Structures are given as structure tokens and as C-alpha cells.
Amino acid sequence: MFNREAEKRKRQASRITLDASVPSLVHALKQPLTAIRSNAQAAQRFLALASPDLGELRAILTDIIADTRHAEQLLQQGGSCGTPAPLARVPLDVNTLLQQVVHRLRHEAAEHHVTITLELAADLPPITGDPLQLHQLVVNLIINAFEAMHQTPVRPRRLVIRTARQDPRTLRVSLTDTGSGMDETTRQQLFTPFFTTKAAGRGLGLTISQAIVAAHGGQIWALPQPEQGTTLCFTLPLGEQAGRGEARDAETATPCQAPPPSRRRDA
């Protein structure tokens, strides 16, 4: 009797985990599929020109292949019937990761009329983390900024992404948009599962982002800007500190601000 009850509880727990993982997988797959569509439409526009830029077309096709592989990886990772995939641990250059994601999202940025500026601190040490998950983290936050600014057509749409050292053992990434900002109630609920202020939102993007950051031993938080927009910050441990769960409380973390002199370019 005891064994039957234990097995029943185990099956129920598995179903709950699977039910929670399905919307997360759907949300994760949305970005590469949207990017594939966006790139294909961009390729069609180039082909309609009298003298299409073959170099740009090759770059678009390369992006489509990369996004297809990304979708395949997400499906493989989500095909474990609710069992979380083990976290990969490889050295990563965060600045390079940000540059790659911004490049991959350049057509979505153009569609949303957003100018992305990278202000990347030089000579940052590598972190140790899961490339697929951290890629998804950055994509989620950038897409979230696009959607926040979509509701403010009058203002110039600008997203500034910065990297800096939070302290000797921690790296900080901040994303500052020129959207409508948020009130304190929204800020307090921002990372609550299924909470959203968007008409068609699922309320999963920031929840997934928080889970990815936490799995890497970091912290994520939001700060409304004085005049307009929002800054989302997250930290990641540097080097061997990664993944040890030494995240700091967001309420006591150093506020996001412009880093020391850095490399800057507009996307």
C-alpha cells in the first residue's frame, strides 16, 4: 500500500514538472523560430533588389542555419520528459556572447526600430557556464526590452547593454531601455511566474531568465530609470566561482550604472 501511494505521488510530481516545462519550451522555441522567419523575410527583400548584396544574403543564411540548430538543441534539452538537463560548464566570454546575440537579433531590432548600443568593459575574465542557457537568457532580456519599447512609439527606441565588474569575483550585465518603465508593484512581481503586463504575454520570459541566472550562481533584478525606461541587471560569478550559488540579494546589490571606459559600438 505504501509503495503504491509513493509511486502515485511520484507520477503526480512528474506530471506537474512536465506541465511546467512545456510552456517554458514553447517560450524558448519562439525566439529562434521568429528569427528564422525574420531572416527569411529579410532575404526576400534583398532578393527583390536589382543588385542584391550577396554577402548579406550569405550572412542571413548562416543565421538561419544557426537558429535552426539552436531550436534543435532546445528540443533535445526539453525532450527529457520534465527532468532538468544537466548544466554545461564551459569557459565563456560574456562580451563575445552579447555581440553574437545582438548580431543574430539585428533584423528583429530593425523591425522594432530599436538601436542597440554595446558598452563592453575591456579585459573581463571569462565565466563558466552553459552556452545554450546563457544565450537564451540574453535573448529573453533583449526581446523583453523590444516589447517594452514597442508600447512607446513616440520616444527614440534605444537599448544600451553594458558589462562591468560588480566586484572582484562578479561580472555584471545591464540592459537599459527607453520604454515606459514600471511602477513599484510591477517591479515586485516582475519575476513571478505567469505575471505579465503585455496583452499577449505568457509571463515566462523573466521567470526563465531568473532561473538561468540562479543556476549559474548569479542574481537578477530591475531598476526603474529616473526619467524613462527600465534597467535589468544580472550578475554572474567569474571563473571558478561560477555555479557555487554565491548570489547576492538584489536589494543590497550595487545599483546598475555606467561602467568605466569601455569599447562602444552601435548595432
Image (spheres, helix red, strand yellow):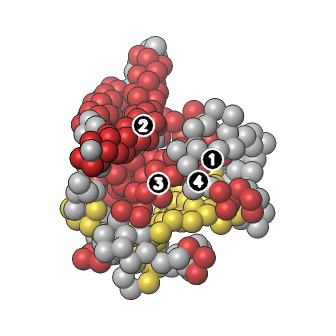
Callout 2: few (<14), some (14-19), or many (20+) C-alpha neighbours within 10 Å?
Answer: few
Using the image, tell me which numbered label, if any, was put on residue 19.
2
Residue of label 3? 209
At horizontal 75% and vertical 43% (from top left) the residue drawn is 152
Question: Residue drawn at (27%, 49%), measured in percent from left and top?
Answer: 2
Circles 1 and 4: CB atoms closer than 8 Å: yes
Question: Label 1 crowding class (10 Å Cα cut-off): few <14, some 14-19, many 20+?
Answer: some
| Label whose residue precedes the other's in the sequence (2 or 3) | 2
Q: Residue furthest bottom?
A: 168
- Mark 3 or 1, nearer chain start: 1
Q: Residue at x 38, y 78 (%)?
A: 246
Looking at the image, residue 243 sits to the left or right of residue 261; the answer is: left
Q: Is residue 143 above or below residue 75?
A: below
Which corner quadrant of the image does residue 29 belong to?
top left
Q: Which residue is mark 4?
A: 192
- 149, above or below 238, in the image: above
Q: Amino acid at mark 2?
A: Asp
Tell me the element at label 2.
helix
Closer to the chain start, of discs 3 and 4, is 4
* Disc 1: which residue: 195
Q: In the rendering, at what x and y percent does residue 106 appear? A: 47, 40
